[in-house]
Amino acid sequence: MRKYKDSKLLYHTEDWEVATVKDYKIYPKQFINDKIPIEKNRCFMLMPFSPEFDFIYGTIKKDLNDNGLICNRADEIAGSKPILNKILTEILKSRYIIADLTAYNPNVFYELGIAHSFKDAQNILMIKQKSSKIPFDLTHLTYIEYDPSNLRFLTATIRNFINENQYLSDFHEALNLCGITNLVCESRERFIDYIQEYFGSNISIITNILNKSSDKYTEKELIEFFKDYEALIIHALNDNKTELFSGLLNVYYNLLVNCNDLKISETFVRNFMETLFVNYNNIDDEILTWKTDLMLLLAKHRKLVKISIPWIIDYFSRSKASSVDLNRYKLESFLMTTEHEDVNQIIINSLFNPNCHIREHMADIIGEKKLYEGRQSLLKQMDIEQNYFTVASIIEAIGKIGDFNDIVFINKWIDEHIEKAIQDHQYFLLKHVYKALGRLDNTPDQKYVLSFKEKYNVYMDSYILK
């Protein structure tokens, strides 16, 4: 059996199957989009291979194993894949990387560079023997010197490093799981430092709440924490920390969503919506966006729906602005795409809301979603609706739902209301009736559509009939 280390061809089976290097991932960029889970209790050791270092590694490995941690080195990884593939995979799935820089080993430095590309600083520990020098480019980084004759000190130092950074590593992982890290990628280190400086080791409270483990704390502790976080938000706002503010808010939204104590969540959600920004009238547009984002996250997680969904519905009481309203777009997108039956029922019930703008927009949404369960409510409201724009949306929605039997009800509405609409010069309404009939009329000659067209063509602009 032949095997070439530097060749593109590797002969590795009895049947002489051929594999090329491109069949394996050996370059860091090939792993960028991989979702390799990080194991919290796993360490990976980067060090030279020699009898001297074997003893040092064995001592470190035993101590870490005795303390509930897994520790591996590249030469221990089984399998037939190229060594670089194994090393890259191990770096990615290990929470902690320990790199021994002694002896200027080029492999160690290459692997350390890869680790620095994928790992946060608090997850990498550099060590070296006292007799060894360190390259100039790394002198500004923290490293630990050790004496090979006193490995007890080294193992204790490694354990302390892991223990001291455990809460930060857990915090990073919680942010990743909530999808927050991607929102602050450009200023992530400053963002983490800002929160750590404010909360210190109490940052673990954030981690536990994000991980839905708020039960570890008393009601008093949770209330004090949320008050502290509110203070942090206001502090950042006053200090104009614009590059960090979005991240701080997104953490807070997720804290409110993931807190297991509904009473506390509700209290601080109401504070956020009603009182927290009461003294900042000069940034009303930004505040409205922040409130929108919180309500959306609550609604998507079906948390405090008695607060979030009514607020979302009420947003549509505003008439459409001439400029682009991104908040309206986000809320409308949620209502259009949600499949939650309780939310759909609230949309249907909103056809009877006192506000005509809400009735109009909910009718539009019911029509676009073709919510057949909203059909009876549409027919009922059509009979009593006084607002021409709203009744136009209702009739269009009835047409989109597509029940042929509803032609009878639309024709009844025409007989009772269309003449007044014409007297009021609301000719646009004719277009919507015409379109609804066109969707519903499945007779061979579309007799209902033709009848309507013949009767009211004189009032309709020519473009309607194209």
Image: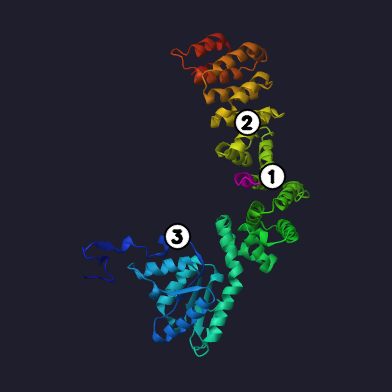
Which quadrant would the N terminus be assigned to in this image?
bottom left
Occupied quadrant, residue 200: bottom right
Residue 256, given in percent of the width and then of the height, sits at: 67, 52
SS at badge 2 = helix
Dominant secondary structure of the residues highlighted in magenta in the image: helix
Helix, strand or loop at mark 1: helix
Answer with mark 1 or mark 3, whichever residue precedes in sequence.
Answer: 3
Q: Residue at x 53, y 16 (%)?
A: 462
Judged by depth in the image, the label closer to the viewer, 3 or 2, is 2
* Horizontal side, residue 429 vs residue 227: left or right: left
In magenta segment, residue 312: no
Residue at numbered disc 3: 32
Q: Amino acid at mark 2?
A: Ile
Do residues under tags 1 and 3 come within 8 Å of each other at their CB atoms? no
Residue at x 66% of width, y 59% of height? 214
Vertical relation: 287 (above or below) 427: below
How crowded is the residue under tag 3: few (<14 C-alpha within 10 Å), some, or many (20+)? few
Q: Earlier in the sequence, mark 3 or mark 2?
A: 3
Residue range in magenta is 296-303
